């Protein structure tokens, strides 16, 4: 019954939103803008969502979500353009696509490759959407049983797992970034006793640090510095013929599409892990299971279909924990969380009660965005590619001004700018030194949740940590956190490897 | 990202900074109420506002120690200490570009935005950034950065000495007029540095047009469409408002 009700709400939302010409116009506009952001090296889907958040402030909630999900979906897909045509991934999510997309373009099959990635991305987004609509009621039902201990551990788990999996160097660095984010989150007056922490007497800091300017600084400023400092050059795009949907090839690779979509949704649902990891894992899985693995890296259709399905399916996956637990599944989803808060929506287990029909509305928008992305991709690719010719030296300073006005406009406070810039510069240095930015952002977002829930939980238990070990969900979360931490300590890791070796040797001797 | 050996050297410095930072967080946290009553609420360690900062401080110190040990074990600390003896200013082109970008942002955010008309501030920032990086010439970058910084210093002195307030009391847009003159001088300098080459002349035309057009479009959108009061509304924004409201 609940599923039927959900389905009815989904279709009602879909038609309500789709029949308004203004919404359709905004949908296509934001999807195309997203494709441009994704296709342009140096600009990312996260930055696109961040900058558009400012512009949606005056819109009603439904239209704002259309614009934000539109740019998110378009941004993740758009990365494939520059990957295929100039061998430079427009976004990290499309890095794996470049390995096979560019050789295809060199062989004169750029149009076929773009047709495949367009359809695969649309299918990936659609499958991700199906998971949002089917899993959300179950997860939010489960989350309603959560107590403060579970929420505290969930926030901690988000930081640790995102730190472990996104760190390009050692996992410690991801955790450090996460704790720095947590520190930023505790600045200001806390919610239980209203005590001012780390405000240094500045009344402007008492309200705490606003999430959106921090996110704009952390994602925008390092990108601008990197692109201008390292002199990104505009490369001539490979020529390509007409783009067609390539249904026959897609049908031939339906097995890869299904597997990649599942990988994408699964990875997306893990807090803070983005579309880039989904793309790479899916690429690896496709290569391992392929009948022609030797073709990978030389222009394989299987490869590009797998990576593009996975990175777009990741969007739906990232929305599942975001909407039901208040924990963003990926960096653009973290930005989306900031936008939701601006529009007075607090994602989490209470979302279904506070805003009935909102999750169905979001999934309906996701479906609309995947259709708009497919149409725009098939029809406008040649026009969008022209944007790749604009030199970064021209558009990056403009992005700089947009970051600044965007950070300021949300609260009309100059203090947001004063904080955004140092956060951005520190984020740049952290990136250079191998620290991932996603855990920092997750820390800033989940900090208040960790703080208030830990203290509330201890208040209820009278200072005892025992409930953490007696409640099944919190025990599982606690054990995962401990295992994740221990697995990164070299002596423990060596011991585990030794144990594994001994176990396997025994098994092979038995056989 | 840096190469591994450089990363381990940087890790040494970062670990020291993290240890100091973690210790400072702990020190601050210990000053927060942990017992007695605060704001009428009876306190205990587990509901204290210091609880999470204490966890953060301890974790940062532990992770700092782990990073320090890694840096020592892999030779990063030793290599850094050896290198530190012959430290010199970064002279590579990418370092110069980095400094130019950061300085431009600092001047824009901390000096111009709170004091000068938003249109003029953005125009100056974009003029510098687009011209300098679109020219793509390290000699011009150096010369124009010196000119840009000298002009910023002048604006800084105008406000630091209180001269800005004095001239604004006579005519409220005086500092905006001064900023406009400074922008025009910058453009003159940029034009002169680029006039010897046809490519640079073309690039100057494109860059100066875009640097002017972007705030010209952006400022009215935010001010009149999204109803966002701009950080500092001076002569140009007031003129735009006059035109906008008389046309409405």
Image (spheres, coloured by chain):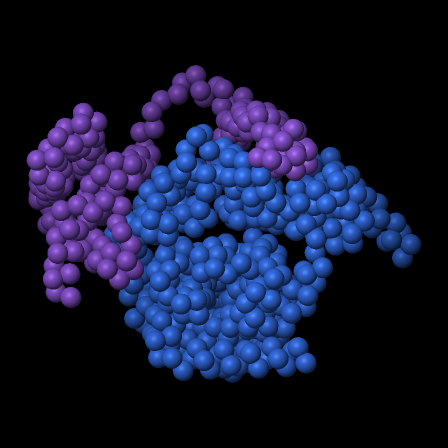
Q: Residue furthest right?
A: A510
Q: Is residue A145 left or right of residue B232?
A: right
Query: Along the horizontal axis of the image, is B198 left or right of A31?
Result: left
Residue extending furthest toward the front: B40
Q: Which of the chains is blue?
A: A
Can see residue A170? no
> How many marks overall?
0
* Residue A466, visible in the rendered structure: yes
- Counting from the top left corner in percent of width and height, residue B67 is at 59, 31
Q: Position of residue B38 (x, y in %)?
A: 59, 32
Q: Which quarter of the image is occupied by the C terminus of chain A?
A: bottom right
At which x and y percent is residue B236? Answer: 14, 49
Q: Nearer the viewer, residue A93 or B3?
A: A93
Q: Colour of chain B?
A: purple
Residue drawn where x is 68% and y is 33% of the image = B44
Residue that appears at 40% across and 38% down:
A204
Which is nearer the eye, A160 or A57?
Answer: A57
Left or right: residue A321 compared with residue A121: right
Where A121 sits versus A39, above or below?
below
| Residue A249 in the image, given as x and y percentages of width and height | 52, 79
Q: In this rendered view, identify the residue nearer to me: B42 or A278.
A: B42
Q: Quadrant of the N terminus of chain A?
A: bottom right
B131 sits to left or right of A377? left
Q: Is residue B89 above or below residue A402?
A: above
The image quarter containing residue A60 is: bottom left
Location of residue B24 by image quarter: top right
Residue at the (51%, 29%) spot, across then down: B14
């Amino acid at each position: 019954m609940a599923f039927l009700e959900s389905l009815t709400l989904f279709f009602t939302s879909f038609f309500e939103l789709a029949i308004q010409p203004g919404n359709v116009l905004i949908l296509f506009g934001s999807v195309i803008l997203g494709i441009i952001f994704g296709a342009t090296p140096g600009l990312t889907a996260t930055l696109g969502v961040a900058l558009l958040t400012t512009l949606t402030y005056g819109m009603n909630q439904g239209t704002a979500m259309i614009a934000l999900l539109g740019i998110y979906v378009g941004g993740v897909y758009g990365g494939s353009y520059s990957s295929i045509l100039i061998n430079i991934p427009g976004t990290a999510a499309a890095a794996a696509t470049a390995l096979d997309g560019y050789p295809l373009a060199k062989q004169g099959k750029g149009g076929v490759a773009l047709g495949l990635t367009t359809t695969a991305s649309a299918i990936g987004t659609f499958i991700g959407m199906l998971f949002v609509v089917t899993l959300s009621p179950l997860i939010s039902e489960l989350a309603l049983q959560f107590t403060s201990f579970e929420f505290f551990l969930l926030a901690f788990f988000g930081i640790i797992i995102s730190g472990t999996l996104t760190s390009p160097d050692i996992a410690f660095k991801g955790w450090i970034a996460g704790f720095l984010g947590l520190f930023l989150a505790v600045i200001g007056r806390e919610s239980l006793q209203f005590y001012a922490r780390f405000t240094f007497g500045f009344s402007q800091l008492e309200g705490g640090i606003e999430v959106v300017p921090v996110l704009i600084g952390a994602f925008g400023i390092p990108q601008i510095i990197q692109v201008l400092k390292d002199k990104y050059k505009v490369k001539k795009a490979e020529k390509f013929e007409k783009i067609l949907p390539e249904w026959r090839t897609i049908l031939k690779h339906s097995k890869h599409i299904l597997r990649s979509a599942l990988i994408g949704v699964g990875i997306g649902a893990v807090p803070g892990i983005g579309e880039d990891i989904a793309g790479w894992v899916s690429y690896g899985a496709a290569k391992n299971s392929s009948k022609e693995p030797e073709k990978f890296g030389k222009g394989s259709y299987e490869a590009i279909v797998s990576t593009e399905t996975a990175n777009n399916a990741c969007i739906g996956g990232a929305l599942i924990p975001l909407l039901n637990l208040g924990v963003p599944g990926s960096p653009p989803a973290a930005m989306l969380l900031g936008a939701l808060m601006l529009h007075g929506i607090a994602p989490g287990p209470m979302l279904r009660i506070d805003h009935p029909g909102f999750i169905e509305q979001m999934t309906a928008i996701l479906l609309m965005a995947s259709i708009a992305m497919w149409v725009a991709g098939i029809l406008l690719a040649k026009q969008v590619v022209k944007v790749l010719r604009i030199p970064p030296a021209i558009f990056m300073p403009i992005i700089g001004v947009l970051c600044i006005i965007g950070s300021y406009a949300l609260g009309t406070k100059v203090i947001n700018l004063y904080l955004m810039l140092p956060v951005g510069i520190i984020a740049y240095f952290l990136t250079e030194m191998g620290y991932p930015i996603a855990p920092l952002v997750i820390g800033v977002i989940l900090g208040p949740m960790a703080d208030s829930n830990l203290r509330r939980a201890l208040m209820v238990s009278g200072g005892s940590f025992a409930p953490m070990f007696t409640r099944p969900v919190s025990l599982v979360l606690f054990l995962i956190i401990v295992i994740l931490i221990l697995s990164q300590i070299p002596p423990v890791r060596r011991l585990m490897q030794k144990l594994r070796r001994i176990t396997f040797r025994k098994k092979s001797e038995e056989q | 990202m840096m190469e591994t050996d450089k990363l381990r050297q940087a890790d040494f410095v970062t670990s020291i900074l993290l240890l100091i930072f973690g210790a400072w967080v702990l020190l601050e946290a210990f000053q927060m109420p942990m017992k007695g009553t605060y704001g009428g609420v009876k306190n205990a360690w587990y509901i204290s506002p210091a609880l999470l900062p204490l966890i953060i401080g301890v974790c940062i110190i532990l992770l700092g120690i782990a990073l320090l040990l890694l840096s020592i074990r892999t030779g990063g600390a030793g290599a850094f200490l050896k290198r530190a003896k012959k430290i010199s200013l970064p002279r590579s082109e990418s370092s110069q570009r980095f400094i130019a970008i950061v300085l431009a942002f600092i001047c824009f955010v901390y000096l111009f935005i709170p004091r000068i008309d938003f249109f003029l501030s953005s125009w100056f920032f974009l003029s510098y950034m687009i011209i300098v990086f679109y020219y793509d010439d390290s000699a011009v970058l150096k010369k124009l950065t010196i000119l840009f910084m000298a002009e910023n210093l002048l604006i800084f002195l105008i406000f630091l000495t209180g001269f800005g307030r004095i001239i604004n009391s006579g005519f409220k847009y005086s500092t905006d007029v001064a900023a406009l003159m400074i922008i025009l001088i910058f453009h003159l300098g940029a034009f002169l540095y680029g006039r010897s080459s046809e490519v640079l002349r073309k690039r100057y035309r494109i860059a100066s047009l875009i640097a002017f057009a972007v705030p010209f479009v952006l400022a009215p959108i935010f001010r009149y469409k999204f109803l966002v009061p701009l950080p500092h509304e001076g002569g140009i924004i007031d003129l735009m408002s006059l035109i906008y409201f008389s046309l409405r």
